[in-house]
Image (cartoon, rainbow, N blue to C red):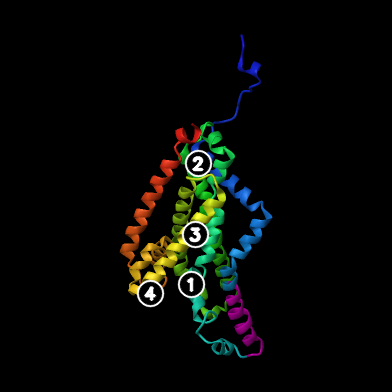
Amino acid sequence: MTTIHDFGLRGYDGGRVGVVDRVLAITTTELRRVFSKRLFLMFFFAALAPAIIAFVFVWIRFIVIEGSGQLVGFGNGMNRMGGDAGPVGRAIFGVDFFFDILRGGSTALTLIYSGVVGAGIIARDRAAGALEIYFTRGIRPLAYFLGKLLAVWFLLLCQVLFGYLVVWIFAVSVAPTDSNYFATTWPFIPRLIAAQSFFCLTLAFWLVALSTSTDSVRFAVLRWIGVLAALRIIAGVLNRFLMTPETNLLSPHQVVKRIAQAIAGAEPSSMSLSSALVVWGILCVLALIWARRHLRPVEVVG
């Protein structure tokens, strides 16, 4: 009797792989691919510039100013000489220092970074013909999408959150005991983590959903960065002429950032939170519809 072994096929004695394992395998494979590139690592460290600036401010406050004061016997006198204003003063004790140290100045950097790490994550597989392999090997589109989503989410957290947590841990370790730095800052750290996790997860969802509709990585990146930048500029121009903060609802980045501000307890923009929630919900529904439309196995494989 002819068996499958006669055709060069071998039996598999291992256990079945569950959906969670497949999702995590896709995620870890994508992360290894990204961090294995030297050019990306150089870009990644450049994208950490805001966190590096925060580290420098903490170093100046607790090592240079207060440390010098202790060295010459002035105690906290040098601290008072440093003043409570500015980023090296009382600002390092607030959530806004870790949430948006540049007060909106890091927006462009975040948009560029998010476009590079996520806009072409599915477009690259489309161009290589990998979707056919995934969907004909028992991997459902949902598991594939979630694997890519988790990878982009983690990559965004690396730029938006993890660096600041390292800065906070460093600040706690070097801050003088009488400054009560840990007692002052610890209450808002869980809110900061929740806010930035929400912010990055939303951007990751929109990125991966948008990436399902093209097989050109370059076009995907330019579309993401170009559209968001254009909407941000249009919102700013309309705000200048109409003098109403609701024009910022045209900018998806500003919408999700306004919600994250509310979660973190940071200083909010003048945009209405309820309006931002409505627009956020509409954009998420549209992204879901877009992904379902362009990630159907029949259309991809056929």
- Which residue occupies the extreme right position in the image? 38
> Does residue 63 belong to the magenta stretch?
yes
Q: Is residue 269 magenta?
A: no
Disc 1: which residue:
185
Tell us which disc is closer to us: 1 or 2.
2
The CA distance from mark 1 to mark 3 is: 37 Å
Q: Residue 226 has which mark? A: 3
Q: Are marks 3 and 2 in contact (CB under 8 Å)?
A: no
The answer to whether 12 is drawn above or below residue 244 in the figure is: above
Nearer to us: label 1 or label 3:
3
Going by the numbered disc 3, the residue's amino acid type is Gly
Q: Which residue is mark 4?
A: 240
Predominant SS of the magenta segment: helix
Q: Earlier in the sequence, mark 4 or mark 3?
A: 3
Q: Secondary structure at mark 4?
A: helix
Of 125 and 71, nearer the camera is 125
Q: Which residues are magenta?
A: 55-73
**Mark linked to residue 220:** none
Name the residue carrying label 2.
144
In the displayed structure, would residue 160 be above or below residue 55?
above
Quadrant of the snapshot with the N terminus: top right
In the figure, residue 195 lies in which quadrant?
A: bottom left
> Badge 4, how many Cα within 10 Å: few under 14, some, many 20+?
few
Q: CA distance from mark 4 to mark 3?
A: 21 Å
- Mark 4 or 1: in front is 4
Determine crowd level at label 1: few under 14, some 14-19, many 20+ residues with C-alpha closer than 10 A. some
Disc on the earlier residue, 1 or 2: 2
- Distance between mark 1 and mark 2 Cα atoms: 39 Å
Of the image marks 3 and 2, the number of the one nearer the N terminus? 2
Callout 3: few (<14), some (14-19), or many (20+) C-alpha neighbours within 10 Å? some
